[in-house]
Image (tube, rainbow, N blue to C red):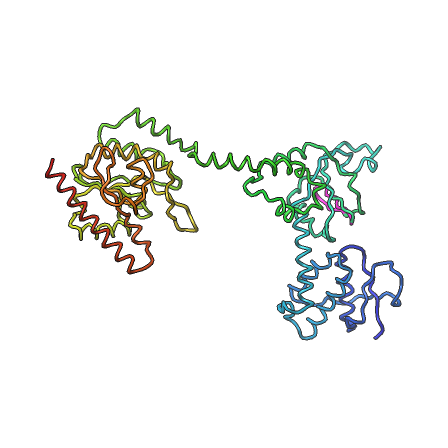
């Protein structure tokens, strides 16, 4: 069969390609016998091919691919698409599922480039406010009597013929505005009801220096994260070819140069607790209203705002008020927070078992925590334990020491480093200083937290650590007994 020529309009001629496709399929023209040429091009292959034909049934993914790829600037796009359709209609119905096929691979890459270009237009196009007569151009309405009208104009240089494909985003988002988008490939004008295509345009008609530019700069500066300032990565996500029409770009040099100083300020601010929680105010109020009993103290703690993030309720100490031994843990866990009681979760159950083996009845000791609230972070539906910071532990220290003053135990046992920090006011190494301690004004003992034993991955190491923990508790029982006898 002699070669045939298909004339295509400039830009993304989707309607022209559909019409040609139907006729070519109807007549059984093979891809090698078709040349897609620009409309008005020199006649190298005879008379243009014309004709009307019924629609062609194609898989939806193919029609979607066609709609995207016709927007690409590659002059071979129509020929490649017709070659794809030909193969799909001749036994390769699932051709697009074969990602390794060279034709499929090339078209998929073109489709991706077009979609990225549309995404860039949605994200990087900036309207400027102008006032024109009738919302179009002054020359068109001069002397017509149409009143001045607000209009928004944007100039953009897309990488492909994506102006029309990107338009639905703007007609939906800015439906009540009158706007125009100008590009070297064509223009679009929206009056709130109808979208009209226009000829290619230059940058000049778009206004500059309006109040929106300052608004964009302010918005960008407010959302700029100095801790993630990476000029190379910024250029990848916000290609430089769009910068000329983006007013916020003027703020980038200063934001980048000031990023290190702002990061230092952020770190300094994060070291302090949130002003919203204002732990100093809560503690000051407690000092002014010093409780007269442990019951009063617990009532104050229960009524106070949590001093750590994520907490829902205060978990108070539990046990006899005349207990010889007070055990201090780090903070309540998930189960403790739900039940409102200390040491009832897995770590608490392990502590119960160790206490029993050491000859200590749980009901004879007082159990409490350095931090009275469960600090956690939500991950999906799970509440993940978060270790309290040093400043948070110190904020809670006043409560703990006031609690111990009411209890006046013979021995205070710190379970883990956080409890030791709360009792001593300084960082303490459990490994190096395990055993007898002084937590003025109380005699003390330092051992591991039972949760530490649960986290040990090796069964043998876990068993060995547990035996050492029980030995510690036996020492605790002996020390407390001697102090009671000596009193």
Image: magenta residue range: 185-196
Residue 284: x %, y % from top left: 34, 26
At x 69%, y 48%, the residue is 167
| Residue 273 in the image: above or below residue 83 | above
| Residue 104 in the image: above or below residue 363 | below
| Residue 73 in the image: above or below residue 98 | above
| Observer-nearest of 168 and 236 | 236
At x 40%, y 40%, the residue is 309
Q: In this view, does 293 lie to the left or right of 389?
A: left
Residue 22: x %, y % from top left: 76, 67
Query: Quarter-wise, where is residue 457 in the image?
Result: bottom left
Screen quadrant of the C terminus = top left
Query: Is residue 318 in view?
Result: no
Q: Which residue lies furthest to the left in this view?
A: 485
Q: Is residue 484 left or right of residue 460?
A: left
At x 71%, y 39%, the residue is 178
Does residue 451 belong to the magenta stretch?
A: no
| Observer-nearest of 70 and 226 | 226
Query: Quarter-wise, where is residue 210 in the image?
Result: top right
Q: Residue furthest front?
A: 432
């Amino acid at each position: 069969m002699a070669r045939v020529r298909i004339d295509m309009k400039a830009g993304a001629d989707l309607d022209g390609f559909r019409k040609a496709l139907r006729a070519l399929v109807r007549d059984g023209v093979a891809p090698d016998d078709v040349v897609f040429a620009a409309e008005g091009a020199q006649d190298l292959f005879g008379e243009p091919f014309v004709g009307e034909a019924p629609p062609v049934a194609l898989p939806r993914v193919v029609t979607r691919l066609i709609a995207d790829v016709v927007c690409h600037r590659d002059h071979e796009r129509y020929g490649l698409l017709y070659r794809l359709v030909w193969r799909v209609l001749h036994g390769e119905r699932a051709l697009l599922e074969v990602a390794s096929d060279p034709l499929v691979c090339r078209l998929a890459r073109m489709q991706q480039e077009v979609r990225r270009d549309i995404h860039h237009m949605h994200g990087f196009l900036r309207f400027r406010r102008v006032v024109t007569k009738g919302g179009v151009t002054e020359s068109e309405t001069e002397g017509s009597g149409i009143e001045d009208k607000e209009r928004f104009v944007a100039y953009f240089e897309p990488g492909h013929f994506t102006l029309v494909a990107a338009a639905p985003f703007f007609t939906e988002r800015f439906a009540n505005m009158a706007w125009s988008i100008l590009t070297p490939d064509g223009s679009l004008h929206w009056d709130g009801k109808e979208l009209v295509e226009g000829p290619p345009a230059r940058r000049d008609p778009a206004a500059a220096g309006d109040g929106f530019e300052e608004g964009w700069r302010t918005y960008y500066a407010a959302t700029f994260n100095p801790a993630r300032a990476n000029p190379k990565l910024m250029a990848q996500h916000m290609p430089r070819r769009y910068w000329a029409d983006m007013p916020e770009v003027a703020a980038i040099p200063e934001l980048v140069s000031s990023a290190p100083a702002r990061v230092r300020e952020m770190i300094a601010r994060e070291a302090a607790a949130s002003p919203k929680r204002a732990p100093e105010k809560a503690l000051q109020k407690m000092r002014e209203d010093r409780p007269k009993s442990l019951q009063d103290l617990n009532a104050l703690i229960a009524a106070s705002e949590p001093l750590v993030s994520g907490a829902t309720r205060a978990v108070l100490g539990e046990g006899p008020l005349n207990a010889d031994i007070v055990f201090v843990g780090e903070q309540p866990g998930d189960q403790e927070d739900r039940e409102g009681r200390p040491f009832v979760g897995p770590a608490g159950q392990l502590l119960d078992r160790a206490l029993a083996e050491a000859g200590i009845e749980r009901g004879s000791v007082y159990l409490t925590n350095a931090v009275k609230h469960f600090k956690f972070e939500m991950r999906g539906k799970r509440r993940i334990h978060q270790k309290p910071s040093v400043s948070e532990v110190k904020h809670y220290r006043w409560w703990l020491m006031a609690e111990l003053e009411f209890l006046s135990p013979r021995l205070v046992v710190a379970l883990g480093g956080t409890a030791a920090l709360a009792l001593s006011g300084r960082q303490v190494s459990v490994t190096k200083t395990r055993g007898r301690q002084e937590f003025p004004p109380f005699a003390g003992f330092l051992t591991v937290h039972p949760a530490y034993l649960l986290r040990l991955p090796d069964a043998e190491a876990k068993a060995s650590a547990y035996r050492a923990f029980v030995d510690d508790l036996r020492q605790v029982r002996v020390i407390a007994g001697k102090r009671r006898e000596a009193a």
